[in-house]
Amino acid sequence: MLIPNEATMREWMSRVNAHTSDTYYYKNWELHRAGTMSLVNQAIQYGTSSPEVLIVGAGNCNDIDLVELISTSAKVDLVDIDGHAIEQAINRRVPYHLRDKVEVISTDITPLSNNGFTPEIFCKLLASRSVNEFTDAMSRFCVSNGSERFVGNKHYDVVIILPVLTQLIGPMYRACSEVVWRDDRAKMHDDFYPEIYNYSTTLSRQVLDYCWERVRPSGTFVITTDVLDFSEDPWKGTFSTQSTSNPYWMRDMIKSAMEIAIFDDAETILEWLDYHKQHSIVFQRWLWPFSENKIHAVFGELLRK
Ligand SMILES: C[S@@+](CC[C@H](N)C(=O)[O-])C[C@H]1O[C@@H](n2cnc3c(N)ncnc32)[C@H](O)[C@@H]1O
């Protein structure tokens, strides 16, 4: 487990992304990339030809076919806190003649970094074991200060949010809590988790609302999110990461599993989607063989404004 003691959120996410930056992941994420690109291509087909596209949470760009996307678009803005990961992906995969159409926007899509939040501070707050101290500090860190309006008032024909909203606080919380609470983690978790969930929901809704505002009238919006982990109980052993399952059986399996339990952060997204259901055009579910011992289920939806 990585211990988050970095000076900035960007440094922490870069360390996390470094684990999935090599070609093994690009190849292994083929099924996930195909699911994502199916929605992205439908989003492009519904709108103007040669659209302007915004992608949030691009990272190593393992879940998008950059060349296909850039070739069919007039302009692609790629956003991530780890802009370096995006630049490396462009250098690896995008021919020079297409690069003029791409802009890399390296920024925190939440107000956290600009409000002085760091992984080190987060770990110290958990170590204090004081829920009051934690909520006082987090309330200040999450206040919107304009920095999270990462593309200003710009509008796009297609806006795509990749699986970033489950990453805003959750992974750092799991990494920190394991280290600072050790043996009495379960007890401390009961006290702190409702607050973690509350702030994660606040940040996700800020991003979702802002990104939805960026979509031009008649434009399209795609969101993909990891919803559950098939390598954890109660689904452990259901799929192997090498599995090339029947897609119909796989979709039914994911549907049933989603009725039992999904990540809390994904719940926030599904609630937001439910609130916007009059705009929904299509949704899909697929498997994301993430690594040798992790296999996620993904939910993706396409909306039209
Ligand atoms: C699970 S990855 C999504 C997969 C990614 N598209 C790829 O192919 O590598 C989540 C991405 O969200 C980014 N991220 C996490 N927190 C962020 C934040 N606060 N602001 C901007 N990007 C963030 C990470 O840097 C990472 O690239």
Image: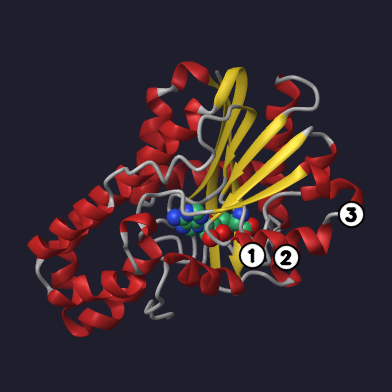
Q: Is residue 171 above or below residue 155?
A: below
Within-10-Å neighbours for mark 3: few <14, some 14–19, many 20+: few
Circle 2 sits in a helix, a strand or a loop, which is it? helix
Identify which residue is drawn at 51% across, 35% down: 152
Within-10-Å neighbours for mark 1: few <14, some 14–19, many 20+: some
Amino acid type at mark 1: His
Amino acid type at mark 2: Gln
Q: Which residue is the site of mark 2?
A: 88
Using the rendered image of the protein, determine whether residue 109 is visible from the camera's viewpoint: yes
Answer yes or no: do the residues labelled 1 and 2 have beta carbons within 8 Å?
Answer: yes
Q: Is residue 295 above or below residue 102?
A: below
The image shows residue 226 at horizontal and vertical percentages of 50, 51
Identify which residue is drawn at 64% across, 30% down: 158
Quadrant position of the N terminus in the picture: bottom left
Circle 1 sits in a helix, a strand or a loop, which is it? helix
Q: Which residue is the site of mark 1?
A: 84
Identify which residue is drawn at 19% across, 54% down: 195
The image shows residue 131 at horizontal and vertical percentages of 11, 63
Circle 3 sits in a helix, a strand or a loop, which is it? loop
Q: Which residue is the site of mark 3?
A: 95
Amino acid type at mark 3: Pro
